[in-house]
Image (cartoon, rainbow, N blue to C red):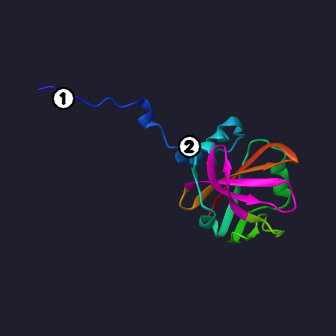
Amino acid sequence: MTIQFPIISFDYFQPSPAKKFIRLTKHAGVLGGQVRIFDELKPVHPDELIGEWDGYILTTGHPFEDELETLNWFGNTFDSTDDVAPLIVARNGERLREIKYHGVVSAALVYDERPTIVYYRAVKHNMVAGCMESKQFKGRVYFYLTR
């Protein structure tokens, strides 16, 4: 008797984008291009962000990371989609909306008083990934929120 095993692609054994992202959160050094995994994460609906979140920077060497440290940023509070405290130090009318970013419609934080948008993606039930882009600086700032 011959047992035939199904042919399984090597990709079947690869970790999910969420697991790859979680692995990045445990990395102490500068991450560089590894954070591009953000684009592979699943979308998150704005309502799923309501509540208080602790924030953590993913170190890529971007200069704005130092500014977040100076501002003593430690997370976000989303009281509703129209009542957001993005830096937990100021509220200036920021809003959560769904925006298409790199082909995925997901929650995004839109600032009223600065040319900045923060895009969010789901990692797991108590963790979301964030990617900040601004006309005030080049490149992207990556972080994650937990509750």
Q: Residue at x 69, y 36 (%)?
A: 33
Residue 110, by quadrant, is: bottom right
Give residue 6's position: percent from left, percent from top: 28, 31
**Magenta segment, principal secondary structure?**
strand
The alpha-carbon separation of the residues under discs 1 and 2 comes to: 34 Å
Numbered range of the magenta stretch: 96-123
| Quarter of the image that includes the N terminus | top left
Quarter of the picture holding the C terminus: bottom right
Foreground of the two, 108 or 35: 108
* Residue highlighted by disc 2: 20
- In the rendered structure, does residue 71 fall within the stretch colored magenta? no
Q: Are marks 1 and 2 in contact (CB under 8 Å)?
A: no
Give the side of residue 82 with respect to residue 114, left or right.
left
Give the x, y percent position of residue 30: 72, 40
1 or 2: tag closer to the N-terminus: 1
Marking on residue 18:
none
Question: What residue is drawn where x is 66% and y is 55%?
Answer: 120
SS assignment at label 2: helix
Per the image, label 1 sits on a secondary structure element best described as loop
Q: Residues within 10 Å of mark 1 (few under 14, many from 20)?
A: few
Residue 85 pos. (x, y %): 76, 68
Mark 1, residue position: 3
**Residue 111 colored in magenta in the image:** yes
In the figure, 98 relative to 139: above or below?
A: below
Q: Residue at x 45, y 33 (%)?
A: 11
- For the point 65% across and 38% down, the residue is 34
| Amino acid type, residue under disc 2 in the picture | Lys
The answer to which of 116 and 30 lies nearer the viewer is: 116
Q: Amino acid at mark 1?
A: Ile
Looking at the image, residue 66 sits to the left or right of residue 16; the answer is: right
Q: Residues within 10 Å of mark 2 (few under 14, many from 20)?
A: some
